[in-house]
Amino acid sequence: MTTHVILVARAFGAKGVYIEGKDEKMVKSILKVIDSWGGSSYFLVKEIENGKSIVNEWKEKGGTIIHLTMYGININDFQDRFEKIKYPLLIIVGAEKVEGWYYHNADYNIAIGNQPHSEVAALAIFLDRIYKGRELYMEFEDAKIKILPQKAGKKVIRSG
């Protein structure tokens, strides 16, 4: 699931991801995607030992911590605050068991509905709301593979 979260983060405009723990195989796979599809100067992939230290550093630098959880404020009720939140954002997406510490240290706990759902879907919807759909037109200059949208069929452009 982590790989899918990272792919969505990159495709939907996030500037990078912090991965708690080590997973060389997954990181290698993501870096291969970045090499082919672009974003090497845009998208950071960094493995860390302790996510709490990143949260604390982010807060010290004046950034905003958003925790996506089904227990938070419904995103529709948060919509009017998007323009007012301070950047940069650190978006926390967890799996099944997220420590209570993250709930208490996030500036906002935001829910994409209050039913069980995928963290992949939650991240995609949240980023789409932040970027207002503009991220869907994003292109990476260093991409070796690009898709040329078609009404029917497939057109792939390869370079390098």
Image: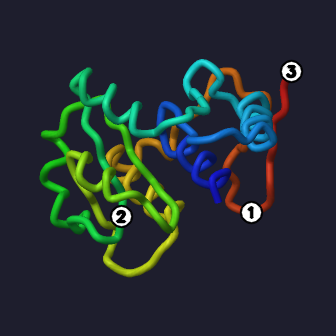
Is the residue marked by circle 2 packed among few (<14), some (14-19), or many (20+) residues within 10 Å? Answer: many
CA distance separating discs 3 and 2: 41 Å
Residue under pointer 3: 160
- Closer mark to the observer between disc 1 and disc 2: 2
User: Which quarter of the image is occupied by the N terminus?
Assistant: bottom right
Q: What element carries label 2?
A: strand
* Image vertical order of residue 59 relative to residue 83, above or below: above
Residue under pointer 1: 152
Tag 2: amino acid: Thr
- Closer mark to the observer between disc 1 and disc 3: 3
CA distance separating discs 1 and 2: 38 Å
Is the residue marked by circle 1 packed among few (<14), some (14-19), or many (20+) residues within 10 Å? Answer: few
Residue drawn 65% across the image and 23% down it: 40
Q: Nearer the viewer, residue 26 or 77?
A: 26
User: Which quarter of the image is occupied by the C terminus?
Assistant: top right
Q: Which of marks 2 and 3 precedes in the sequence?
A: 2
Q: Is mark 1 on a helix, strand or loop?
A: loop
Tag 3: amino acid: Gly
Residue under pointer 2: 69
Residue drawn 69% across the image and 39% down it: 22
Residue 124: image x %, image y %?
47, 56
Residue drawn 33% across the image and 53% down it: 67
Residue 130: image x %, image y %?
32, 46
Q: Nearer the viewer, residue 108 or 134?
A: 108
Tag 1: amino acid: Ala
Q: What element carries label 3?
A: loop
Residue 75: image x %, image y %?
25, 63
